[in-house]
Image (cartoon, rainbow, N blue to C red):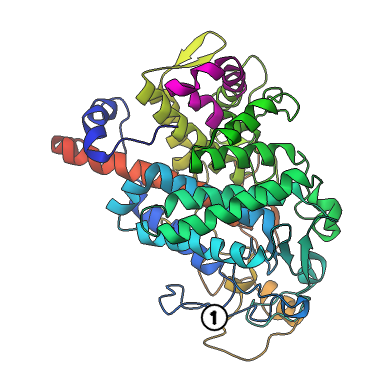
Amino acid sequence: MKKHASPQHCFPLLSIFFAIIPFSSSFDYHKALSNSLLYFETQRSGRLPHNQRVTWRDHSGLTDGLEQGVDLVGGYYDAGDNVKFGLPMAFTVTMLSWGVIEYGQYMASAGEYGHALEAIKWGTDYFIKAHTQPNVLWVQVGDGDTDHYCWQRPEDMTTSRQAYKIDETNPGSEVAGETAAAMAAASIVFRKTNPHYSHLLLHHAQQLFEFGDKYRGKYDKSVGVVSSYYPSVSGYQDELLWAALWLYRATDNHSYLNYVLKNALSFGGITWAISEFSWDVKYAGLQIIASMLLREEKNKVHKPTLEQYLSKAQHYLCACLHKNNGSNVDRTPGGLLYTRQWNNMQYVSNAAFLLTVYSDHLREANQQLNCHGELVGPEEILSFAKSQVDYILGANPMAMSYLVGYGPKYPTKVHHRGSSTESYKHDKGFIGCTQGYDGWYARPHPNPHVLVGALVGGPDVNDRFRDDRGNYVQTEACTYNTAPLVGVFAKLFGLESTELSSNPSLISSW
């Protein structure tokens, strides 16, 4: 897959593109980008570094893995609880890495490139620890059932820190594949700035892929405690295809591409027409990446199979744009993509990212998207992606920013243990398991700490939102909600700042 052109090469083309995509000064994408990266520092587990910017957090989970004789300190808490779930954590890192690969130059212009790499490395450092043997990966720390029984900040938690692994006897191809994808994608990110680390990540990624492929099995059957929280509905075939594609991008080794081509039919890569993309269902993402390989001359020999991947990629993209014949993604009256009630924003942020990346691909290839005979240009696709981002930032019937800490109105009672209780640094008095529910969860007041950069679950199908700590369906945020937005915010910031520098006369018309 071709890399994106450097800024000095793409600006002349983009200046033409800008005239078609007007930008409103009502949203500060630079601020949104900065906020979104700050959120990952809030979700850190382990010993926090000296340059930690979220100062109300402190060290936590310092004995993780101790009972099992392995160092599992670090990583991320997935959402508002204190469990470290491997599959969504890996997907978070994959999407952060993909965003940097595509839009790192804009992050650098915004002064956020270093923070983006820190967010990725916090995850990959943990994955290196968790991959203790070629065919052993520790995939969870903590127990969701006991954790949800308590309302404690992570610095105080007294709940189980049992660690769970997959191995040859208890396979888990989904989480092995996604972790391989995350480390392969991250190896691309660090290739120039830290080549030794990049090589190490790639080594782990290749081992994990081989492990997940050789010992196939569903991870939620091997690790039963995860089945109530992050069950694998789509199975493991999509993760194996996804991992192989990222390894192909990282190595240019055709054995990985051949894997994607050989298993295209049996693994569902060219049969599943999907209208969602998430930590569980990777088909749309891998279909889009595979379809974009058609641009490279060396892949023309694989045109028949790659065109079938393209067909399924088009299904997803056209479904988001409401241009499929009857099988589109629903929308709220306010125009937000709506997949399902619980944490709908994860699907919105992922869609915005995939649409943005594909619009770039079409523009660079001088092509259009074919939606059942209707041709859609890259400018229309990017405009729709931008509409979803703007809805998130406040252009919605509630006039509410669903990115916490951004704008004048945002959720203040986020379902999040750490931010809803007093900072451990300010009050080291122990907060017991159920004491947190009595003293903090039930409080009618806003959380003591703003969970800056968190993307909450969002409004219902009618654009309604109830800001209540107990309304976890709408007010809980997750790392994989925000991760795709990092790249999109960077892209929109880059377009906006370049438009201003290329056309300063436009400022007076805003």
Q: Is residue 282 above or below residue 94?
A: above
Of residues 133 and 186, the one drawn nearer to the viewer in this rendering: 133
Q: Is residue 271 above or below residue 231?
A: above
Query: Residue 130 in magenta?
Result: no
Give the position of the N terminus as an image quadrant. top left
Residue 151 picture quarter: bottom right
* Residue at x-position 63% and y-position 91%: 429
Q: Is residue 506 above or below residue 493?
A: above
Q: Residue furthest top?
A: 373
Residue 214 coordinates in the image, percent (x, y):
76, 45
Q: Is residue 495 above or below residue 225?
A: above
Of residues 225 and 426, the one drawn nearer to the viewer in this rendering: 225
Residue 6 coordinates in the image, percent (x, y):
28, 39
Q: How many labels sit on residues?
A: 1
Residue 430 coordinates in the image, percent (x, y):
67, 89
Q: Circle 1: is it few (<14), some (14-19), or many (20+) Cα within 10 Å?
A: many
Q: Does any portion of residue 2 appear in the rendered image?
A: yes
Query: Residue 289 in magenta?
Result: yes
Find numbered disc 1 in the image and state the secondary structure of the residue it sits on. Answer: loop
* Residue at x-position 62% and y-position 57%: 89
Q: Does any portion of residue 404 appear in the rendered image?
A: no
* Residue at x-position 41% and y-position 19%: 377
Residue 238 coordinates in the image, percent (x, y):
69, 37
Main secondary structure type of the part rendered in magenta: helix
Q: Which residues are magenta?
A: 288-312
Q: Residue furthest bottom?
A: 429
Amino acid on which the number 1 mark rests in the picture: Asp
Give the position of the C terminus as an image quadrant. top left
22 displayed left or right of 99: left
190 displayed left or right of 505: right
* Residue at x-position 36% and y-position 58%: 193
Q: Which residue is mark 1?
A: 58
